[in-house]
Amino acid sequence: MDALVNKKIKQVLKGDQNAFADIVSLYQHKLYQVCYRMLGNKQESEDIAQEAFVRAYMNLHTFDQKRKFATWLYRIATNLCIDRIRKKKPDYYLDAEVAGTEGLDMYSQIAADDQLPEEQIEQMELQDRIQYEIGRLPDKYRSVIVLKYIEELSLQEISEILDMPLGTVKTRIHRGREALRKQLNNL
Amino acid sequence: MNTCPEHIIDYIHDYLDGDISREHEQELKRHLHTCSDCKQLMQELSETIAFVKSASHITSPPHFEEAVMARLPKPKSRVGMQKWIRRHPLFVAAAVFCLFMSATLLGNFMDDRQFSVTKQPNLVVEGQTVIVPKGEVVKGDIIVKNGDLIVEGEVDGNVTVINGQYMASSAVVSGKIEEIDEVFEWLWYTIKNSVKSAVTFEDKQATK
């Protein structure tokens, strides 16, 4: 597979844009899945996954063909997802009191998007429930858990994708597992 | 569980990562036999993993590939040019050299629009015209730039007129007479001169 991909990459670098379509078709499901599990929104995931391919195309000349292409691609996609998640985070504090009210903080203003009532969670289909629980994880744990248990990548690959030491990846997986366990136990 | 040694928790995680040594694994198993709290933690973590792993595979929406291809930038000729440049560095270096060389030479040519003449005694200058008066003998070369030269007397040397006219009636010039008007002639003259001076410089060095 790697030989095939490298051949396609060479064709693209020579100016054959159509060869890139083959690369997209090989990796589209993997990449879309990571984005979907990270972002939990179909439209956004499609947009980010497409963006990841476009960036890969534009920076293809920087890719070292001795390395694994999938790892490089995952790295572009996870970085884009993490950026997107950070941008979505509100830059105000939920604890801040809403102007003109007394004792009303921002918690009471937002729709209960993050935490659903218990009954509703219990009625969820299993697949929705999985996505919901993954989405509740802090993003630094979410990325490792998705890469490890949904993409089933090795710790070494995850460490390359996220550009962090193996030890950090392990710690995050441990804590991510623990956080998930607590989320599931709280019900 | 609060009384359990902390490294047991680490062992549980190492075990779940599939990254545990034999001794640690045996120690963990012995501990799990005696400690129901740890056993339950292990159980719950395994279930958590199974829960996440039961996520179904998600496939990208239809026409994803076409959408990506539509978003790619159109291949530009600029890219081809860059590639070509990268493949022929010597040629590019030569081209750049020629460009700069001709630029400086032409630049000099353009700057040299000013009238100038070699200083010699008994030359008469009237506006942009240099005259060697009748009966006078000029010893040495005369170079006139951007002006005319009229020789009525005698010149004992070479005469060069750049961008001007050489007029003589009954003149006696012992050396060469040159008139230079065109850019390329001027270029040729500059190159010839620099070579000549380089050679004479070497000759001088050699004679020393």
Image (cartoon, rainbow, N blue to C red):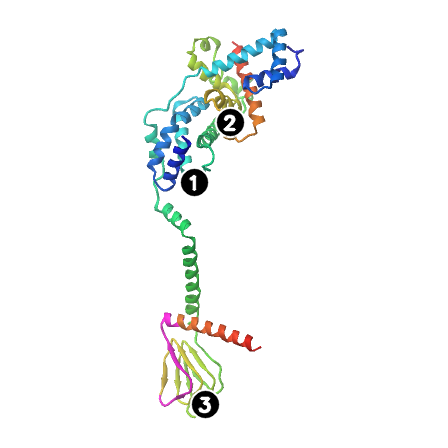
Question: Badge 1 sits on which subunit?
Answer: A
Q: Quadrant of the N terminus of chain B?
A: top right
Q: Foreground: B46 or B25?
A: B25
Is residue B62 one of those drawn in magenta? no
Q: Residue at x 43, y 12 (%)?
A: A126
The residue pinned by badge 3 equals: B137
Is the residue A79 above or below the residue B175 in the image? Answer: above
Query: For residue A153, which numbered disc appears in the image?
Result: none
Report in which chain the residue with disc 3 lies: B
Gap between marks 3 and 2, in whole Å? 94 Å
Secondary structure type for disc 3: strand
Displayed quadrant of residue A26: top left
In the rendered view, tell whether residue A46 sits above or below residue B136. above
Q: Say which residue appears at 35% left-offset and 44% top-offset.
A: B76
Amino acid marked by disc 1: His
Viewed as shown, does residue A45 lie left or right of B42? left
Which stretch did the figure color magenta?
B169-186
Q: Nearer the viewer, mark 3 or mark 1?
A: 1
Which residue type does callout 2 highlight?
Answer: Ile
| Contact between labelled residues 2 and 3, with CB atoms less than 8 Å apart | no
Asked whether residue B56 appears in the rendered view, the answer is yes
Horizontal side, residue B155 vs residue B3: left or right: left
Q: Is residue B39 above or below residue A159?
A: above
Identify the residue under disc 1: A61
- What is the chain identity of the residue bearing mark 2? A
Secondary structure found at label 2:
helix
State yes or no: residue B180 in magenta: yes
Is A120 placed above or below B134 here? above
Quadrant (top left/top right/bottom left/bottom right) for the C terminus of chain B = bottom right
- Say if labels 3 and 1 share a chain: no
User: For numbered disc 1, what is the local secondary structure?
Assistant: helix
